[in-house]
Structures are given as C-alpha cells and as structure tokens.
Image (spheres, rainbow, N blue to C red):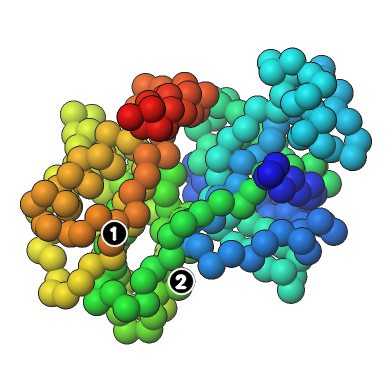
Amino acid sequence: MARRTTTLEVRRTERLTPHMIRVVAGGEELAAFPDTPHTDRYVKILFPRPGVRYPEPFDMDAIRSELPRDQWPAMRTYTVRALDHAAGELTIDFVHHGDVGLAGPWAAAARPGDVLRLAGPGGAYAPDPDADWHLMVGDESALPAIAAACERVPAGVRVVAMLEVADAAEEQELGCTGVLHTTWLHRRPGAPEQLLDAVRSLEFPPGRVHAFVHGEAGIVRGVRRHLVDERAVPRELLSVSGYWRRGVDEDGWQAEKAADRAAAGGR
C-alpha cells in the first residue's frame, strides 16, 4: 500500500534559535492526517525537482510509474513537532545550516502559502507511562522529538535529558509534565564523543528506565552499546535511531540505511 501523501500550505514560520526554524502548515487535507500516539512521529517531506512538472492532483504512484527515478521528488525525513487538529495546524522544526542541504534552506525561505507535501506519518516511540524515569539523549536533529516526548511524560516522573547543540544560543526551553533535569553540551573541536562521555558518567536514578537515544549515528551506536552492555538496560526499553551520519549527506545516509536493511533481510 502506498504511503499517504498530504498537501498543506505554510501558514507561518518562526526562528526559534539562530539555527532552528519552525514551520507551521495547515490545509483541508490535514483533517485526514492520522493522529498517532507516537511522540517520534515523522514524515517524509517531498521536494519537487527543478523543472519537473508533476501530475495534479499530486500522485506519487503515478509519478513512480510515469517518470524516471531522477525526476521523483527528493525526500527528507522530519519529526512532527506538534499536530493540532482543532486548530488545523501541523508543526515541523528544521535545523538550518545556511545554504547547505535542501530542507533547511527551504524552511528559511518559506512564506505563507508555500506548498508543503508530506508522506506518512511513521513512528514507534512514546514515553512508557509505567517507567520509573526517562533518559533522552540527542542533538539538534532529535530535539523536536525529545521536546514532544517531554510533554507526554506523566506528572512527577523524572526525565534526564542530555542534549548536544552548537552553543548556548541553540538551547531551547523544554516544556515537561514530568520533573525535567537537562544537561546542555556545547559542541567543541576535539570532543566528538562528549555526549557519549556524559552518558557514561551519568549517575542513574533508581528504578526502570525508558531511554530515547536519537541523533548522529556514531554517537547513537556508542550510547546504545553502553546502555545495553554496561548498564544492563533491556533492549525493549530502548528507542535508538541514527538520524544522520557525520560526513555523509542525507541521500548517502538513507542509501546506507537501505543497504543495511537489505543485508539484514538477506541473513
């Protein structure tokens, strides 16, 4: 079955920090967008290729059958920061690194009325309401999902968030229904594993932890190994995903992940 495609229009944008841009979109098709229970709910944003005309109404099945692959829309994966059906609004936060990449520059240039097409949603994680405490580890790419998760933790439950960003200007105030303890790490030369080191040195609170570890693939792998091998956290209590890999662009990273999935299926 083809993944649902939703066409929206930008309503407004907001620069949350020097490198984080919020885009709020809406439209008639949002009414049919599923409100799943996952706080890591994500979509594939579809960016048209320059000079290519697509069928109207927009139909990805028709595009795949009628156009060569190099004319298919480019896809980028983003977390749905918020979905408000009552207001008719969907919110996505974009990391913006100047003219580098595809989605960040689009968000910086977005204006009310611009088209935003989405495929999805997907997702698998939400904070376990029965956990004694929650560990959330990530960088800017994981911050929207972590922020959404913090808003879903039961009242009074401890949340330990360890977050790496460029500098103090990139820190955001996180709303949390639980009791939030946040450590902000500022990226610095010569310390590529400072987030992993911080988790290693963390004194764990007592009780059963539910952990969310997303971000740069190398760091995510190291934190997962530490939690499983050294902290004896059961794998079923971990949500772990590499959103990107240092030195590899989005297309290259997605190709790596697809190859890994194919190899795993072949074993």
Taking the image as shown, residue 27 lies to the left or right of residue 92, namely: right
Q: Amino acid at mark 2?
A: Glu
Taking the image as shown, residue 163 lies to the left or right of residue 121, namely: left
Q: Which residue appears at 84% of the width and 38% of the height?
A: 58
Q: Residue 68 in the image: x percent, y percent?
A: 74, 15
Q: Quadrant of the N terminus?
A: top right
Q: Residue 151 in the image: x percent, y percent?
A: 46, 71
Element carrying mark 2: loop
In this rendered view, identify the residue nearer to me: 169 or 70: 70
* Residue bearing the label numbered 1: 236
Q: Which residue appears at 16% of the width and 52% of the height?
A: 228
Q: Work out whether 266 lies above or below 31.
A: above
Q: Amino acid at mark 1?
A: Glu
Q: Quadrant of residue 51?
A: top right
Residue 124's label in the rendered image is none
Q: Which residue appears at 33% of the width and 36% of the height?
A: 217
Q: Residue 98 in the image: x percent, y percent?
A: 54, 29
* Residue bearing the label numbered 2: 151
